[in-house]
Image (tube, rainbow, N blue to C red):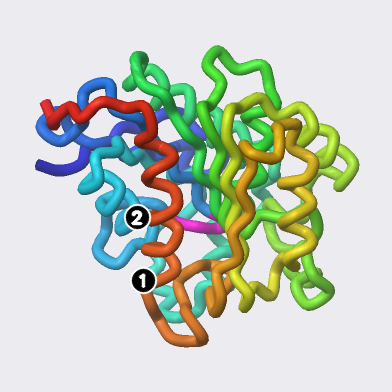
Amino acid sequence: MGWLEITEKGRYGDKVVRIFIPDKTTRISRGPVIILMHGVHGCANVEVGNKYGQIAQLLLNKGINATMIETSRAYRDMKPYGDDRTTWALEAFKGKTFEEDHADNIVGVSRIQEEFPNSDHWLWGFSLGGIHAILIASENIPKKPQGLILSGSGINVTKEAEGALKLPILDTMPPQKALKEATMKVSTQKLISFWGTEDNVFSKESCRAIVDLVPLPPENKDFHVIEGADHSFRLMRGEQSIEPIKVMLDIVVPHVLQGQGTEKPI
């Protein structure tokens, strides 16, 4: 049992988009698929301690084919930078544009759809990954997602976070008007959005605004506040914790499995 890594051509740096999917012994035949999309300068892989890898394994344990996209970058090894993640991000993504980052995610989603042609799929994006998910669901793609899951994704950042907009990728973000217009064109069946009360990047109102703009009936849109969770959903009341992830999974899993069979791994 394990994971299979496949690659597609990326738009920046090493020109590689890494994609992780359950291998043949692990995947659930015709089971639903969740595509995890990381935040800006994020890493999504099956290395020990990776947040997205943890989420993917928990989803797989619950009968959902979890997959991950890790976008292209100049450097992947963070070890030489120690705890200085900002310097690593500046060097690993220097000059990368939002458009290039978005193209990487489209390539990843398309390949995962090819790998699971008979499954419903959901896009689950964290922070900037949620913005990419919204845009993809508003575009003319071959297969529309069954649902969107957003974790800490909003229309505009807080004053406290405005300095981050000078960082690579974020410095070429589309204007707020364009994001709003895309959100109003989203085509999907279900939206689930999460916001943590300790989020210092997006306010509750900013995240709620996206939910309000998506053209779905109110009963098909859920907005959940997680008390004590930070923007990354790695901390609970300032302490490292998997609790925010468990809270989200308890909400997400029943929706994704709704109407699905109980097939075993093939």
Q: Is residue 158 left or right of residue 122?
A: right
Q: Amino acid at mark 1?
A: Ile
The relative height of residue 242 versus residue 44 in the rendered view (above or below) is: below
Chief secondary structure of the magenta portion: loop
Q: Residue at x 78, y 77 (%)?
A: 160
What range is drawn magenta here?
Answer: 39-43
Element class at badge 2: helix
> Residue lying farthest front?
219
User: Which sits in the foreground, 17 or 110?
Assistant: 110
User: Quick check: is 108 in the magenta stretch?
Assistant: no
Mark 1, Cα crowd under 10 Å, few <14 / some 14-19 / many 20+, is some
Q: Quadrant of the C terminus?
A: top left
Find residue 3 and report its horizontal and vertical position in percent: 20, 41
Task: Kindly check if marks 2 and 1 are in contact, taking CB atoms under 8 A apart as contact.
Answer: no
Q: Residue at x 72, y 46 (%)?
A: 211
Residue 55 got which mark?
2
Find residue 251 and report its horizontal and vertical position in percent: 44, 53
